[in-house]
Amino acid sequence: METDLNTLPQGDLRLLEHEVARRLLVSTELARVAYVASDGTPRVYPTMFHWNGEELVMATFAGAAKITALRARPDVAITIDANTMPPDVLLIRGRAEVTDWEGIVPEYALAHHRYAGPEQGARNVAEANRPGVRMARITVRPAWVGVLDFQSRLPAPIAGRE
């Protein structure tokens, strides 16, 4: 028997198969990653990402302050949302894993090609790919997933209203 994805509770990992989630995971919308900075304050950074079917992969250049913060406090919340009316929203919670990388992170190149197109993406990557470049590969495997489309899937307080 096939599960109606619109009846799954928020948090269910099977929501990654929802049409809204599938569309946003291959879109050119930025992921907004919320984390706790080294000084204990909350931060959000927008970033391009690559979905490999199991985890979101993001990259940043070595020396970025978020690398130290994510290693110290790896729990993150992510939203990928479309600026439409009504909005489509994919919410993900998980733990960031940071790996030091010599050269360009492959998923960084894949993301640039998706966001900017093959030609401009290749130029962007070539410009960043200098001798000695170091990056950090940041992966988040979803541990909790939420989908909102404000039609069939609403926030809990709204959904409970009659």
Image: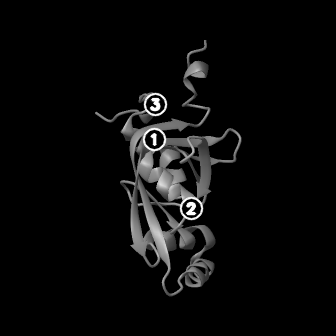
Q: Earlier in the sequence, mark 3 or mark 2?
A: 3
Q: Is residue 103 left or right of residue 151?
A: left
Q: Kindly check if marks 1 and 2 are in contact, taking CB atoms under 8 A apart as contact.
A: no
- Residue holding disc 2: 48
Measure the C-alpha gap from mark 3 to mark 2.
24 Å
**Residue at position x 55%, y 73% in the image:** 113
Residue 19 position, x and y percent, is 49, 45
Label 2: which secondary element: loop
**Residue at position x 69%, y 45% in the image:** 84
Position of 104 relative to 6 (above/below): below
- Residue holding disc 3: 10
Label 3: which secondary element: loop
- Residue holding disc 1: 93
For discs 3 and 2, the disc positioned in front in the rendered view = 2
Q: Camera-side residue: 131 or 5?
A: 131
Label 1: which secondary element: strand
For discs 3 and 1, the disc positioned in front in the rendered view = 1
* Amino acid type at image mark 3: Gln
